[in-house]
Structures are given as C-alpha cells and as structure tokens.
Image: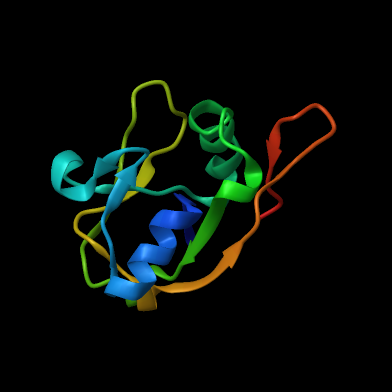
Amino acid sequence: MTIYHIALRTDWADAQAAGQYHVSTRGVTVEQEGFIHASTAGQVEGVANRYYADVAAEDLVLLVIDPERLTAPLKYDPVPGAAEPFPHIYGPLNVDAVTGTVELRRDAGGRYVFEG
C-alpha cells in the first residue's frame, strides 16, 4: 500500500541532490525524532490541515512512497487520538522509494484536500 509524506519543496529538492531525505516533520530531523512521519491516503488531509495550514500550497509537495522500495524499516504505530495507526519510517528516506509527487491544493474554504 502506498504511503505519503508532506514535505517542504526546498527540503525535497535538497534530498534529491543528497540521495536521502532526513526530515521527520517541519523543522525536525529523523535523527531528532527517531522516524519520519508518513500517512496513508486517508490520513493526508488531516495531517495537512492540522500541521501545514499556515504553509502556502506552492511551498509543499506530497511525496508518494512505495514501501517495498524503502531501505529503512516501516512500522505502523498507534497515535493517541487517531482511529488508525500511522506509518513511520525508522531511518532516512531513500529518494528512489519516492515514485512521484503530488501537488497539494486547497478547496474554496482554504482547507487542504487530497483525493488519494
């Protein structure tokens, strides 16, 4: 099953040049957090609107990740208050596990929407 990660466009560009992505979430590295936050298709909108509502859509990119290509372990962990566990990547994200990117967009009310 495909998983997703919301990235700042500049962080993703840096990762493409380096070969690995090290950002767990906004301003926090995988080395600091212990894992990279990811989402299932049904979790993307909630994450985008909760943690990235103040970021312009053009500054974000949604990474489409094939779990079979990951070199770091993937675990689904329970998150307090969440109905379903979230996927977490326990190490840097190898850029060749990213099979594509999706532009995030907002609806007429300003909320991020994703039809995964």
Residue 109 point in image, percent of width and height: 80, 26
Give the quadrant of the C terminus: bottom right
At a point 15% along the width and 41% down the height, the residue shown is 32
Residue 102 occupies which quadrant of the picture? bottom right
Is residue 57 placed above or below 102 in the rendered structure?
Answer: above
Asked whether residue 48 is in view, the answer is yes
Is residue 25 placed above or below 63 in the rendered structure?
Answer: above
Asked whether residue 2 is in view, the answer is no
Is residue 106 placed above or below 66 in the rendered structure?
Answer: above
Determine the residue located farthest toward the right in the rendered image. 108
Residue 19 point in image, percent of width and height: 29, 75
Determine the residue located farthest toward the top in the rendered image. 81
At a point 44% along the width and 36% down the height, the residue shown is 84
Out of 88 and 53, give the one closest to the viewer. 53
Q: How is the image coloured?
A: rainbow
Residue 53 occupies which quadrant of the picture? top right
Q: How many marks?
A: 0
At a point 49% along the width and 61% down the height, the residue shown is 63
Is residue 12 placed above or below 30 in the rendered structure?
Answer: below
Out of 21 and 83, give the one closest to the viewer. 21
Residue 42 point in image, percent of width and height: 58, 44
Residue 8 point in image, percent of width and height: 47, 49
